[in-house]
Amino acid sequence: MIKLNSLKNKINEILRKKYPIKSSFDNITDLSHFWIKGGIVDWNKYFPFHINIDGLILDTNYAKYKIIKVITMNNIEYSWKKYLSLYLSLLNISFNPIVNKYKFLFYLHLYNNIDELCIKSIGIQYKKEKDVININYVKENKVKYNLTWNIANRKLDYLRNGDNHFYFHSFCIDHHSAEIRKELMRLFINRNKYKSIHFHLDNNGGGDLVPAHLIIRCLVGVKEKWMKNIVKKVMVKGNKRKIIEWDCWNPENVHNYNYETFKMLNLDFIPNYQNKYNGKIYLHMNTINGSASWFFITYLIYAFAHEIIRFNKLSFGKIIKFGTIKSNQLFINGMSGTTSGDGNSVNIKYKNIIIDCPTEQFISCSIKKKDMNRFWIGLNSLE
């Protein structure tokens, strides 16, 4: 078992040595490439009955009872809501139930290796009846409920809907250069043939920013004021910090920071449109779209949305940022993931836990600071 305070101290030490700007355990939920994984839970031990996010028991003789308190292995008592808030303080905001209830619910059904989160017993109530029961975790084959790790993703990206549909399953050039090159060249050549263009990003978790910059440059034509250089701080040898700046919108320049990545695409040419694309743009996205794919989504919004509507929601003590748009040219479908502008994580082992810590952070770029960690959502997806 692991003590929560010991884990917090270790995380603060890792951030101090590996992350390029000042941060602490209290900020880890907002770092998109910081993850506590591996041994935080035991994937072979499951809660003895099925519960929902509200603590309602869904099966066994305790069905209809609701969990009102939790007693952990170190004999600390929490209300159900406070227990969830403590648990979520260790996880990236993408686990927050308001974003994706399935991932966190899966974790809730697993044995936790942290003393302060491992459930020893629960207090339950149904109408006026109350009880306290001990929790004995069981093997997966002993439980009858089914858990889903993620919301079922739409399969539109696997269907060829027409020449004006462009499919980017990943922006990772190392592994997907042929597909990215093919779709980029189709767009470069045919941009003005289409009255509408569809971009399918289903399951695109990001990768390199070069494709995102090239697509936007093709659609926008002449560079706009919001299209800024990237300035980032990175960790180098000896735990030293270094600041790098480059014009991310000009990757074909041989002196550019991204030039070697750009060369891997082996493009026939880069278009030089002098006008902005005037057709309709349909963007298909889902919650996996973080990192570079999220930058692409945000770039499209900056370039083509007529109005950006930003709002926040409070969920288990955490303020989650959302945004949507009004536009008669750009139409977004689904809900995106997000990013905080960090990246290039290193793996560090602490006892049985693997901790991913980013070693770089964007200091400034085209994205407004108020939009980092913002989830974009289509109007038809709003509650």
Image (cartoon, helix red, strand yellow):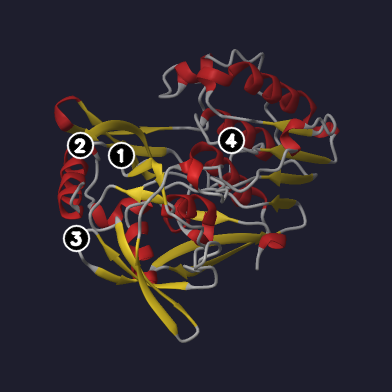
Q: Image quadrant for the C terminus?
A: bottom right
Sequence-wise first label, 3 or 4: 3
Secondary structure beneath label 4: loop
Mark pair 2, 1: CA separation:
8 Å
The residue lying furthest to the front in this view is 61
Sequence-wise first label, 1 or 4: 1
Relative horizontal placement of residue 117, taking residue 12 as reference (left or right): right
Sequence-wise first label, 2 or 4: 4
The residue pinned by badge 3 equals 74
Amino acid residing under circle 2: Lys
Relative horizontal placement of residue 219, taking residue 293 as reference (left or right): right
Crowdedness of circle 3 by 10 Å Cα count: few (<14), some, many (20+)?
A: some
Residue at the spot 45% in from the left edge and 32% down from the top edge: 247
From the image, state whether disc 3 or disc 2 is nearer to you: 3
258 is higher (above) or lower (below) than 127: above
Numbered tag placed on residue 351 in the rendering: 2
The reply to whether callout 3 and callout 2 are in contact (CB within 8 Å) is no
The reply to whether callout 2 and callout 1 are in contact (CB within 8 Å) is yes
Residue at the spot 23% in from the left edge and 54% down from the top edge: 115
Sequence-wise first label, 1 or 3: 1
From the image, state whether disc 3 or disc 4 is nearer to you: 3
Q: Is residue 341 visible?
A: no
Amino acid residing under circle 4: Asn
Numbered tag placed on residue 204 in the rendering: 4
From the image, state whether disc 1 or disc 3 is nearer to you: 3
253 is higher (above) or lower (below) than 21: above
Place residue 343 in its image quadrant. Answer: top left
